[in-house]
Image (tube, rainbow, N blue to C red):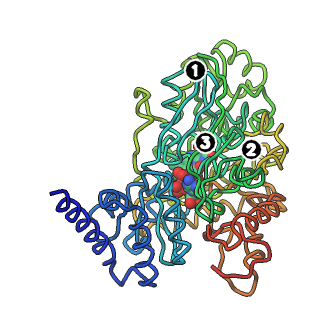
């Protein structure tokens, strides 16, 4: 009887491998390598139940939903968007190790996906045959309130992290992004900022340890990987170096009650006056205050909003704003006191929902294109006026510009502390976004972003014109392999994202991944590398 069970389970296991191997020719450029990879992976997983649970090929009914459910930019879910030959959804860290080891052995290209928010879809799209390691099942969050620290696996979203912190304690928080569905994998490895940035800096500034799978398939912690490697993955983009399995982060203190507020203006004249003054105040005022500028259309009009967060009471906020920034015209009725975790829901524009809304994994329904800039000198009113005009154009129906103030903690941390170099001297960051619903609107909406970006060139940081890696922009360049070495190509956009930190990132890359196993269209090159993508 036992023998029969043994044979039937083995039979099921090898049948599942056989089915997995029958990937259609159309999606497999090098069938024998993929066959070898699959055999290697299936044998390493060594359990038919696990194999059928974690390996998804285009033959499986699960494939399409696994692929599309974490696509957060619909620009990359068109029928002609290249699809992976296989998606692995590991349930144990050892599955990631197996994938890396087998991929190296058979020359398979991999992409790592956590939350799927990459602006250019690089975690799940490329133009050569590839496999996606999708970390959605590795999402445990272990909070140690006494030591004010958390181990969070990289399949978790920042919303899930915030929820767990807020549920446990009302005066602890974490300074990361505003949108709850963003994954901690990509977000922390590129920097990560939100409403607490002026007081506490970036998410990456609070990472104290990490567990990664390196290019040799080894699991390494901070001590084993060394300080250079650990430095690189806190702002240099994880995808160039390893698969990050989990982060250890330090939590920060917040008051049990804080204040959120919003002021909106529809008149160009009053909005421009406030924005002009905002540029002189927002990065210098007390770092307890964070006020953003958001410009977008609302019912055929351009609307300027000034949403903000203050780490204190309404009374103290009004005193501060009346003294330092009276032009804002903030009134008591614009303000609301709440806990930090409630402010996360408020900032994410999730209405009056209870905090467990932060755990929802909603999928974005729109396509978009974005770009970023850093502003070091306040712009003249004429520049903002130009933006206002652009927002009235027909293709700007869903466009949005977001100005995020820096200063405070951001100016106290040196440009070299982490790979994120846009610290002291930056007044604010601009994000240009445009969204659309239908494919035929794509070109004109993308051109609109380019036009506004070009128009701003005289008013933003130059030499280099900076950009934020988490707001990835392939217009800055990508490897094409014509004439120049990969190092020279990569440098042209690398210095925009990382300034002088680019060279150190290249040295780390050369030492930890000399064969450039972890690579994508904009990854950090190895030193003097000549190979082409
Ligand atoms: C709607 C929306 C709102 C956003 N809001 C903010 C914000 O408030 N503040 C802010 O700073 N940014 C924000 N971002 C940008 C966001 O921080 C980046 O897009 C970030 O890289 C997304 O991480 P992810 O894991 O969700 O994305 P993914 O697409 O999964 O990954 C992004 C990149 O990181 C790599 N990567 C992912 N996981 C790992 C891992 N475990 N190991 C190694 N490499 C990995 C991927 O391969 C890819 O190159 C927002 C983006 C969107 C779409």
Q: Nearer the viewer, residue 371 or 173?
A: 173
Label 3, label 1: how far apart the Cα atoms are? 17 Å
Name the quarter where the N terminus is drawn: bottom left
Q: Position of residue 39 (x, y in %)?
A: 40, 73
- Find disc 1 in the rendering and name its residue: 335
Label 2, label 1: how far apart the Cα atoms are? 23 Å
Q: Badge 1: few (under 14), some or many (20 or more) residues near its Cα, within 10 Å?
A: many
- Which sits earlier in the primary sequence, circle 2 or circle 3? 3
- Find disc 3 in the rendering and name its residue: 294
Please say if the residues under marks 3 and 1 sit with CB atoms less than 8 Å apart: no
The residue sitting at 62% across, 69% down in the picture is 519
Q: Nearer the viewer, residue 299 or 29?
A: 29
Q: Position of residue 353 (x, y in %)?
A: 40, 28
Q: Position of residue 176 (x, y in %)?
A: 61, 39
- Find disc 2 in the rendering and name its residue: 428
Q: Nearer the viewer, residue 6 or 395?
A: 6
Can residue 140 be seen from the camera position used here? yes
On screen, residue 190 above or below 258: below
Q: Position of residue 89 (x, y in %)?
A: 41, 57
Figure disc tally: 3
On screen, residue 490 above or below 68: below
- Which sits earlier in the primary sequence, circle 2 or circle 1? 1
Please say if the residues under marks 2 and 3 sit with CB atoms less than 8 Å apart: no
- Which sits earlier in the primary sequence, circle 3 or circle 1? 3
């Amino acid at each position: 009887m036992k023998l029969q069970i043994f044979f039937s389970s083995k039979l099921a296991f090898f049948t599942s491998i056989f089915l997995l191997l029958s990937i259609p020719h159309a999606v497999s450029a090098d069938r024998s390598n993929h066959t070898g990879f699959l055999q290697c992976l299936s044998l390493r997983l060594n359990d038919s139940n696990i194999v059928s649970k974690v390996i998804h090929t285009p033959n499986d009914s699960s494939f399409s939903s696994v692929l599309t459910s974490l696509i957060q930019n619909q620009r990359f879910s068109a029928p002609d968007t290249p699809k992976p030959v296989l998606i692995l959804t590991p349930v144990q860290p050892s599955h990631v190790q197996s994938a890396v080891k087998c991929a190296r052995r058979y020359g398979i290209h991999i992409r790592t996906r956590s939350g799927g928010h990459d602006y250019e879809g690089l975690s799940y799209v490329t133009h050569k045959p590839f496999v996606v390691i999708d970390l959605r099942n590795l999402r445990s969050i272990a909070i140690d309130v006494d030591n004010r620290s958390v181990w969070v696996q990289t399949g978790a979203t920042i919303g899930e992290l915030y929820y767990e912190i807020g549920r446990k304690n009302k005066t602890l928080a974490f300074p990361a992004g505003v949108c709850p569905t963003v994954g901690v994998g990509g977000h922390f490895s590129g920097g990560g900022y939100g409403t607490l940035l002026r007081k506490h800096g970036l998410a990456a500034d609070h990472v104290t340890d990490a567990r990664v799978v390196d290019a040799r398939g080894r699991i390494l912690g901070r001590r084993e990987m060394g300080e250079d490697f650990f430095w690189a993955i806190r702002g240099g983009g994880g995808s160039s170096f390893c698969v990050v399995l989990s982060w250890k982060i330090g939590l920060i203190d917040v008051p049990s009650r804080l204040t959120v507020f919003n002021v909106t203006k529809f008149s160009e004249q009053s909005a421009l006056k406030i924005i002009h003054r905002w540029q002189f105040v927002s990065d210098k005022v007390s770092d307890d205050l964070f006020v953003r500028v958001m410009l977008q259309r609302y019912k055929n009009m351009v609307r300027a909003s000034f949403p903000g967060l203050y780490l204190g009471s309404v009374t103290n906020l009004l005193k501060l704003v009346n003294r330092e920034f009276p032009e804002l015209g903030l009134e008591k009725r614009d303000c609301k006191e709440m806990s930090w975790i409630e402010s996360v829901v408020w900032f994410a524009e999730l209405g009056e929902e209870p905090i467990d809304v932060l755990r929802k994994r909603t999928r974005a329904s729109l396509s978009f294109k974005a770009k970023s800039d850093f502003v070091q000198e306040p712009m003249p009113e004429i520049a903002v006026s130009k933006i206002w005009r652009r927002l009235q154009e027909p293709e700007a129906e869903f466009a949005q510009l977001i100005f995020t103030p820096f200063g405070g903690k951001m100016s106290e941390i040196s440009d070299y502390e982490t790979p994120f170099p846009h610290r002291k001297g930056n007044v604010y960051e601009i994000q240009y976004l445009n969204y659309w619903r239908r494919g035929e609107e794509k070109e004109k909406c993308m051109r609109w972003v380019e036009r506004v970006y070009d128009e701003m060139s005289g008013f933003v940081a130059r030499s280099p014109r900076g950009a934020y890696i988490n707001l990835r922009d392939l217009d800055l360049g990508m490897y094409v392999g014509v004439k120049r070495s990969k190092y020279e190509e990569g440098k042209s956009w690398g210095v925009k994202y990382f300034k002088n930190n680019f060279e150190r990132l290249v040295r780390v890359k050369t030492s930890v991944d000399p064969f450039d196993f972890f690579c994508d269209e904009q990854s950090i090159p190895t030193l003097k590398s000549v190979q082409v993508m």
